[in-house]
Image (tube, rainbow, N blue to C red):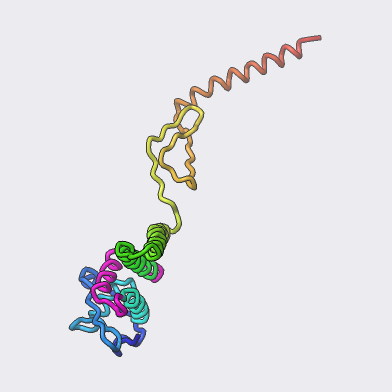
Amino acid sequence: MNIAPDLAMPTAIAATAPAKAAAPPRIRLSSHGFSVDHPDPELGEQLMANALGATDREAMDGILRQLVRASVSGGSPDEVNLSFMISMVKSIKPRDSVEAMLVAQMVSVHVMAMRCAHHLANAEDIAQHDSAARALGRLARTFPAQIEALNRYRSHGEPAITVQNLSVGDGGKAIVGNVTQHASVIVSDKNPASAARNAPKASRSTRAHDSADAEREAQP
């Protein structure tokens, strides 16, 4: 699919605060390809790049091409589908190229899942029903996996930990609720009162050993 000449060169796009707050422009589809529909071409590219998490025209063009193809309905790209997909990408706010690619996949999977749901609802025989149901099931499982992948990437692979009702007994064991199985909790008892309770026990034990040693030495 071709692209308008004004989007052909890979050029860095600088983001500005006003552009991030504005809505992305629409994409104008034609028999020759597509272009960003905005009265100010430079501002339009900037708005679209911000929405898609792209850093230059080449990245923006690549993601747009993929979204255009994923929006196909009835054999041709659908502007309504495409606008929805771009809006969803913007709402998730991809922050780098990896997130931009993953989020584009996520919205595409959602669109495909809804398409399969439509086919399932309108299936005319068992074969169509089973085919649509299988496809919908796979897509429905893929989407939450993508969400988890995005969350893990954004947290640099570290699982989130929620600790509730933490209590520490004299033995130093912690009872912790809602902790992921990969996480560990180390509890150190620095309570002076607890240390004071333990100190006399150690002293009595030492005195007992000293007394026993003295008795053995006194025996002939």
Q: Is residue 129 visible?
A: yes
Give the quarter of the image for residue 111.
bottom left
Q: Is residue 218 above or below residue 14?
A: above
Q: Position of residue 17 (x, y in %)?
A: 23, 70
In the picture, residue 74 is in which quadrant? bottom left
Q: Is residue 21 left or right of residue 187?
A: left
Say which residue appears at 39% left-offset and 41% top-offset. Answer: 163
| The quarter of the displayed image where residue 67 is located | bottom left
Q: Mostly what secondary structure, the magenta segment?
A: helix
40 sits left or right of 122 in the view: left
Q: Is residue 80 magenta?
A: yes
Which percent across, then down, holds residue 191? Answer: 44, 30
Q: Is residue 142 visible?
A: no
Q: Residue furthest front?
A: 125
Picture coordinates of residue 63 (x, y %)?
A: 35, 76
Which residue appears at 26% of the width and 86% of the height? Answer: 30
The residue at 71%/16% (across/down) is 213
**Region in magenta:** 73-99
Task: Please determine whether, in this image, residue 18 is positioned above or below residue 154.
Answer: below
Report the front residue among 127 and 93: 127
Quadrant of image for the C terminus? top right
Is residue 160 located in the magenta-colored stretch of the structure?
A: no
Q: Quadrant of the N terminus?
A: bottom left
